[in-house]
């Protein structure tokens, strides 16, 4: 009986050890800070405040990111249930605001049939970025961006087209100027020249920043938004966002808190004036191996309370190879 128990324990131990070998190795730790350039792009004017708000999801999901060769990464997403955001804490008034910026050369392949290829070139102090996106194999989007920055300003012009359809041709110009070291102003102008009727979009933004807080605002045709970001300590941040749309609906106010712990865990909580709330919690689970190798898996948990006062839950894993 003792021999059988010993064999069983050895088999279980070998099985668990084999599972650990499948996990990615722990990468060098980092401190969560915004490494901002001297000038801030207009699309990032509200970045600090909006990053404090959690991205709640519902259901179960598994995200695997693997670098298969130089400048080529493979992303695998597996989900069960409704894993996308069912409620947005804030609205977007600027072109591709808070979107992931593909500013480096490379190719990102998604197991769902999507791919993003980026090519970058600098010509006479003007940076050119060409991005091509293929989604679900049948739809595509191509964008070319020319960006130029100087001592006090940064400007860009973007030209994009979806599904090779000339009607979807879109031109967007963004400009940001530093009036004083702590004060910047900017504007955005967008138009679809081949669409009918032609409806140009114009917006104005301002940004006032200090070492411990940042106040930003945007006024556009579709609404008005004010964001306040406050950093109390390296691991504690609070943000408030005020939204007012142009459709006559009530204005909304959201409050969020982001807490980072020394062990790498992150907690994000939000509540708003529409009686919605939620939080996300992420934590790295480490597995020590011989030769001082450390394997890691990131656990993600989410809870969302919607307008109907329903409580929804989400759980997932993130593996970054």
Image (spheres, rainbow, N blue to C red):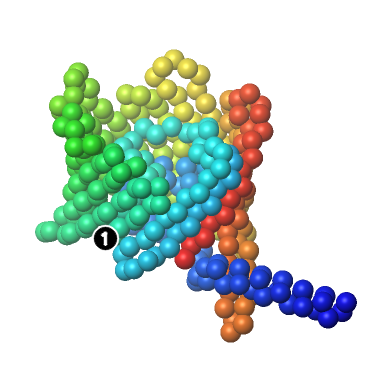
Res 35 visible: yes
In this picture, residue 145 sits left or right of residue 245 = left
| Residue closer to the observer: 288 or 260 | 288
| Residue closer to the observer: 220 or 179 | 220
Q: Residue at x 39, y 44 (%)?
A: 98
Residue 68 percent coordinates (x, y): 37, 66
| Residue closer to the observer: 111 or 302 | 111
Using the rendered view, name the quadrant where residue 216 is placed: top left
Residue 246 percent coordinates (x, y): 39, 19
Point out the residue furthest to the bottom here: 291
Using the rendered view, name the quadrant where residue 199 is placed: top left
> Up-down: is 293 above or below 272?
below
Number of other residues with Cα within 10 Å of mark 1, as a class: few under 14, some 14 to 19, many 20 or more: some
In this picture, residue 300 sits left or right of residue 90 = right
In this picture, residue 131 sits left or right of residue 208 = left
Q: Residue at x 21, y 52 (%)?
A: 129
Q: Residue at x 72, y 71 (%)?
A: 12
Residue marked by disc 1: 105
Using the rendered view, name the quadrant where residue 310 is placed: top right
Q: Residue at x 19, y 46 (%)?
A: 144
Res 53 visible: no
> Up-down: is 290 above or below 104?
below
């Amino acid at each position: 009986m003792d021999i059988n128990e010993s064999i069983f324990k050895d088999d279980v131990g070998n099985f668990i050890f084999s599972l650990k070998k499948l996990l990615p190795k722990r990468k060098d730790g980092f401190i969560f800070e915004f490494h901002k350039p001297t000038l801030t792009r207009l699309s990032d004017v509200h970045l600090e405040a909006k990053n404090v708000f959690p991205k709640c999801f519902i259901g179960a999901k598994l995200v695997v990111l693997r670098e298969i060769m130089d400048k080529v990464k493979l992303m695998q997403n597996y989900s069960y249930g409704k894993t996308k955001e069912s409620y947005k804490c804030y609205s977007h008034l600027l072109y591709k605001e808070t979107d992931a910026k593909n500013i480096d050369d490379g190719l990102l392949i998604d197991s769902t049939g999507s791919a993003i290829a980026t090519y970058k070139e600098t010509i006479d102090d003007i940076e050119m970025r060409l991005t091509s996106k293929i989604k679900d194999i049948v739809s595509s989007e191509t964008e070319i961006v020319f960006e130029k920055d100087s001592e006090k300003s940064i400007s860009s012009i973007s030209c994009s087209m979806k599904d090779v359809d000339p009607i979807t041709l879109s031109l967007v110009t963004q400009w940001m100027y530093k009036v004083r070291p702590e004060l910047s102003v900017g504007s955005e102008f967008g138009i679809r020249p081949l669409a009918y009727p032609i409806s140009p979009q114009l917006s104005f933004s301002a940004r006032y920043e200090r070492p411990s807080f940042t106040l930003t605002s945007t006024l556009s045709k579709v609404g008005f938004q004010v964001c306040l970001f406050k950093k109390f300590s390296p691991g504690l941040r609070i943000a408030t966002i005020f939204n007012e749309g142009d459709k006559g609906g009530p204005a909304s106010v959201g409050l969020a808190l982001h807490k980072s712990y020394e062990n790498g865990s992150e907690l994000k909580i939000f509540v708003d004036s529409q009686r919605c709330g939620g939080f996300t919690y992420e934590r790295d689970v480490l597995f020590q191996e011989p030769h001082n190798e450390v394997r890691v898996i990131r656990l993600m948990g989410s809870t969302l309370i919607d307008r109907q006062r329903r409580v929804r839950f989400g759980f997932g894993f993130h593996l970054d190879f």
